[in-house]
Amino acid sequence: MTIRVLIADDQMMVRQGFTVLLNAEPGIEVVGQAVDGVDALEKTAELDPDVVLMDIRMPRLGGIDATRRITGAPGATARVLVLTTFDLDEYVYEALRSGASGFLLKDASADELAQAVRVVAAGDALLAPHITKRLIAEFSRVSAGPRPPDRGRVGDLTERETEVLSLIAQGLSNAEIAAHLVVAEQTVKTHVSRILVKLGLRDRTQAAVYAYESGLVRPAGY
């Protein structure tokens, strides 16, 4: 099935460049471009893309608010992949909280960009690999800070599911979690699916953020 992509960025060169790169990839089609957040909302409703590549800083309506509205709409299916220039852009933290499924730097290679689109479209979450742990920990420190564990929704998880959630928050992939727990990768996938359903979360990124915000996992130094 072809992955339908909408590119939202106020820079024409960026939009056109990503369009050329992605349209050259098998199984990916850029179905539209948006010049700002308002345009992104309208085109998402009109074109029903699978993935929205969302710039953070745009006129009229920024990428964070646009992401929140897109992912929070009733029956929303589009997943948002945030694009930014800086790997520790303070706005990225709020974008993740707003429902973004992934985070990627604009200087990513064509292969990295295409892979990111495929990962997010498949329902997984993606953060730039070399900063995953640092980004999530910093997100927690800046926007949430240390707090007592929230045992309400976390208490609905089994002991093994809680352990898997903690490992997700540390940036481990399903394969890495499987190796750590000495279980089959399919078993980990099943645990992840159950965690998302029980906590009412969309993907692994939200699960990781929730683990920090609930106090289940603490950033380094706390």
Image (tube, rainbow, N blue to C red):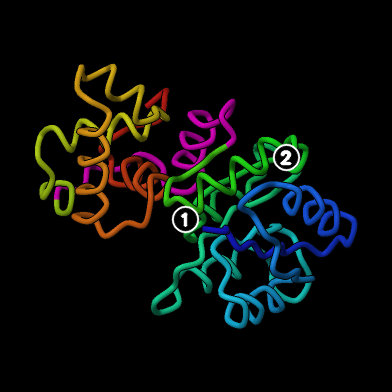
Lateral position of residue 30 relative to residue 59, left or right: left
| Label placed on residue 97 | 1
Amino acid on which the number 1 mark rests in the picture: Arg
Q: Position of residue 101 (x, y in %)?
A: 49, 52
The span from disc 1 to disc 2 (Cα, nearest Å) is 18 Å
Can you give x and y, in whole percent of width and height, for residue 206 in the image?
39, 50
Which quarter of the figure is the C terminus placed in? top left
**Does the CB distance between marks 1 and 2 fall below 8 Å?**
no
| 75, 56: nearer the viewer | 75
Magenta segment range? 128-151
Q: Is residue 141 magenta?
A: yes
Majority secondary structure in the magenta region: helix
Task: Name the residue carrying label 2.
Answer: 86
Side of 188 relative to 207 (left or right)? left
Q: Is residue 38 above or below residue 148?
A: below
Q: Residue at x 36, y 57 (%)?
A: 202
The number of callouts visible is 2
Camera-side residue of 214 and 26: 26
- Callout 2: helix, strand or loop? loop
- Label 1 or label 2, whichever comes before in sequence order: 2
> Label 1's element?
helix
